[in-house]
Image: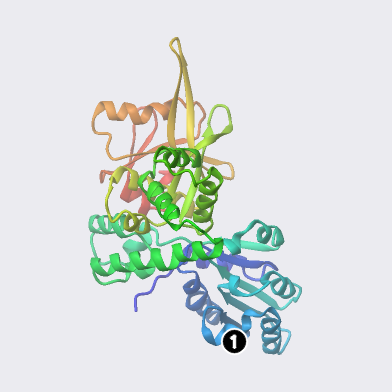
Amino acid sequence: MQEFKREQYLNQLVAARENKLIKVITGIRRSGKSYLLDPIFKKYLIACGVKENHIIKLDFDLIENHKYRDPIELFNYVNAKVKDESMYYILLDEIQLVDNFEEVLNSFLKKNNLDVYVTGSNSKFLSSDIITEFRGRSTEIKIYPLSFKEFVENKNISEDKAWKEYIQYGGLPPVVIQKDYKQKREYLANLFETTYLKDIVERNDIKRKDVLDAIVNILASSIGSLTNPSNIYKTYLSIGDKDISLNTITSYIEYLENAFLIKKVERYDVKGRKYITTPFKYYFTDLGLRNIKLNFRQQEENHIMENIIYNELLLRGYNVDVGVVESRNKNGRTFYEIDFVCNMASNRYYIQSALSIDEPEKNIQESRPLNYVKDNFKKIIVVKDNINAWHNEEGILIIGIIEFLLNNNSLEL
């Protein structure tokens, strides 16, 4: 069986070990949350000398553990397993299936020799009341599908072939291990329809699945483009569908966000230092899911590459916005877009994505927005071409997408 190390996430769990907080592992279904807990983290604990009877693991989606979805049953089960004052590690998979799980987790927090780790996958787990309930009492570890670097490390193929497969089928581990492209497509199609959409429809009591499907298709078609719920609503009005409200469109998009299928990216006025309320951009957490929804049509590599760069910045821990920079001259004001403004603590990077800047006009076009930013933070253009990284006359780093993704320190070149 193919194994994925997921070292980045293991390191986060190790850093949070015994920190007196609940470790909450969130992420899209089938991204590897359960696998991170067991076998990866469980093996780590055993290698560190933790006895197996001090690791209490429950998978709540298994029929044999159905009774432990009752919080009292769960609490009593764990209590019965704790035999001494040594540290016990509680690994709870799909905790949202437990009724009133907040209460039982808070009870575990009060015990000094319990170190609790949980996974959750859907909007119920991330609703605002749950976030409020655990504010200051949890450490969230966000897990994503395989990065391109993880993908390459698990494929015995060239980087170019890996890129072509990755932009088509994405990085969900169960998809990656499928033997051929037909199996990958069938798995993705089944996963999207019977797991993601079904879960969203059932949990949010959606009445118009046709509208939900249409919204997914619209967002999948417009990655890298500006849009908002109002624009989608106007589309429905234009075709004569009067039964759909703007609130419905907005809610359906939020359900997709809460299920980790998409991410909304806000626009940030670099010079004005403020957010622009609308429109937004939306990117897909996994491109395989995006592509299967469109039946692998609309394979514009520039937009797909932009989506991959966005996902990479997220998994590296950056907060990411779309940048807007203003230029003034005698003819008035002009606004230019910077694909990504990413921040972490005091570090900031401005990043443009471009298939190529071989032509002088294209070089000027991609560099212009960055040159209008007058601060001293680093400016980068990521290109599709397989090149050695270099700096142009304005000091902008030009780097190929493969090197950008495979080198964890690529932003510092």
Q: Is residue 31 visible?
A: no
Element at badge 1?
loop
Q: Position of residue 257 (x, y in %)?
A: 51, 54
Q: Nearer the viewer, residue 167 or 299?
A: 299
Q: Residue at x 44, y 62 (%)?
A: 197
Numbered-mark total: 1
In the image, is residue 375 above or below residue 413?
above
Q: Which residue is mark 1?
A: 51
Residue 99 lies left or right of residue 355; in this view the side is right
Q: Residue at x 51, y 82 (%)?
A: 62
Q: Position of residue 355 (x, y in %)?
A: 28, 40
In the image, is residue 78 above or below residue 244?
below
Q: Position of residue 361 (x, y in %)?
A: 27, 26
Q: Is residue 40 visible?
A: yes
Residue 11 lies left or right of residue 18; in this view the side is left
Q: Nearer the viewer, residue 353 or 7?
A: 353
Q: Quadrant of the N terminus?
A: bottom left
Q: Position of residue 343 (x, y in %)?
A: 53, 43
Q: Nearer the viewer, residue 63 or 32?
A: 63
In the image, is residue 400 above or below residue 90?
above
Q: Residue at x 73, y 84 (%)?
A: 85
Q: Residue at x 66, y 58 (%)?
A: 131
Residue 69 lies left or right of residue 311; in this view the side is right
Near mark 1 (Cα within 10 A), the count class, few <14, some 14-19 or many ≥20, is few
In the image, is residue 153 above or below residue 290?
below
Q: Specify the amino acid type for callout 1.
A: Lys
How is this picture coloured?
rainbow
Q: Quadrant of the C terminus?
A: top left
Q: Residue furthest right?
A: 110
